[in-house]
Amino acid sequence: MKPFTSGSVIAAWLLRLTVAGFVYLNYAKGFPAFDLKSFSFYIHSAYLAFAVLLIVGGFMQKPSLTVLSGLFLFILPIVLLVRSFPDDLLSGMMLYLIPLSAGFFFFTAGNNN
């Protein structure tokens, strides 16, 4: 059976929207606090910014914005995994694995799906 290659564009957009929804549900709650001395404020801000840039990058011809957003959406969960390493590694693994895998996909594929 051959793969459904024409559906890859729809799959990429569904993945973009899923990442944006996931980031909104999990990281938008901590954003309104505006505690500039908190490390989590900067992580939440970066997640929101790069999720929006991932969607914007899908509308552009060149994949550079998508690749850059994917790279940062790949790095941010790694930073959070390292910070929570001894305490909360197993329970938070899925929370970090979803944006990590989606970010790695867009980092490697760009807009050429």
Image: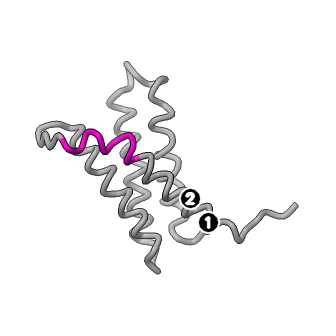
- Residue in view at x 47 percent, y 51 percent: 19
Residue 30 locus on image (x, y percent)? 25, 39
Q: Which residue lies furthest to the top in this view?
A: 87
The part of the image, by quadrant, that contains residue 26 is: top left
Task: Classify 65 as above or below 76.
Answer: below
Element at label 2: helix
Q: Disc 1 marks which amino acid?
A: Ile
Identify the mark at residue 10; answer none if there is no mark: 1
Task: Classify 52 as above or below 34.
Answer: below
- Residue in view at x 42 percent, y 70 percent: 57
User: Residues at badges 1 and 2 in contact (C-beta under 8 Å)?
Assistant: yes
Camera-side residue: 2 or 67?
2
Q: How crowded is mark 1: few (under 14 residues within 10 Å), some or many (20 or more)?
A: few
Residue 111 locus on image (x, y percent)? 52, 70
Horizontal side of 98 relative to 1 (left or right) equals left
Camera-side residue: 79 or 7?
7
Residue where numbered disc 2 is placed:
14
Horizontal side of 36 relative to 91 (left or right) equals left
Residue 64 locus on image (x, y percent)? 41, 71
Camera-side residue: 52 or 93?
52
- Residue in view at x 48 percent, y 31 percent: 93
Q: Give the range drawn in magenta.
A: 23-32
User: Is 24 contained in the magenta span?
Assistant: yes
Give the number of callouts: 2
Q: Magenta region's main secondary structure?
A: helix
Element at label 1: helix
Q: Disc 2 marks which amino acid?
A: Leu
Tell me how far mark 1 sits from mark 2, CA to CA. Answer: 6 Å
